[in-house]
């Protein structure tokens, strides 16, 4: 899916179609789980498999691409520095 999307030159705002918005929320939850997993790895050492955090990272990347793909027809809303000031 990523090959069909335009290259990014700015941050993507989490918006767009209902599907894209839900995928952005899922990505946020996945990122939070990844941060908690890394904290557990550092706190408990060998008690948590580091592959879990790597998997969550890749899942988050997939959700981002799927959100962008869901917005392919309408386009991503990109962040413009200083636009809302």
Image (tube, grey):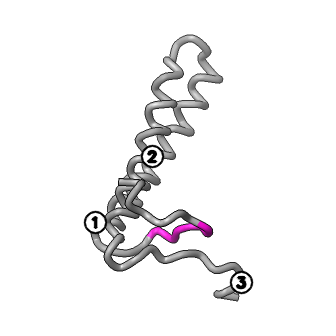
Span shown in magenta: 9-14
Mark 3 or 1, nearer chain start: 1
- Mark 2 nearby-residue class (10 Å; few <14, some 14–19, many ≥20): many
Image coords of residue 78 (percent x, y): 54, 75
Residue 5 in magenta? no
Cα gap from disc 2 to disc 3, whole angstroms: 27 Å
Give the residue at mark 2: 60
The kind of secondary structure element at disc 1 is: helix
| Residue at the extreme front | 3
Cα gap from disc 3 to disc 1, whole angstroms: 28 Å
Q: Is residue 83 left or right of residue 76?
A: right
Q: Is residue 80 left or right of residue 20?
A: right
Residue drawn at point x = 31 percent, y = 76 percent: 73
Give the residue at mark 3: 82
Q: Is residue 45 above or below residue 29?
A: above
The kind of secondary structure element at disc 3 is: loop
Mark 2 or 3, nearer chain start: 2
Res 43 quadrant in image:
top right
Cα gap from disc 1 to disc 2, whole angstroms: 15 Å
Give the residue at mark 1: 19
Image coords of residue 48 (percent x, y): 51, 18
Residue 13 in magenta? yes
Depth check, front residue: 82 or 40 = 82
């Amino acid at each position: 899916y990523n090959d069909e999307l335009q290259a990014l030159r700015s941050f993507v705002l989490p918006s767009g179609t209902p599907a894209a918005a839900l995928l952005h929320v899922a990505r946020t939850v996945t990122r939070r789980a990844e941060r908690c997993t890394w904290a557990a790895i550092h706190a408990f050492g060998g008690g948590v498999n580091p592959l879990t955090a790597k998997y969550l990272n890749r899942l988050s990347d997939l959700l981002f691409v799927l959100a962008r793909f869901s917005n392919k027809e309408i386009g991503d809303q990109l962040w413009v520095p200083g636009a809302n000031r």
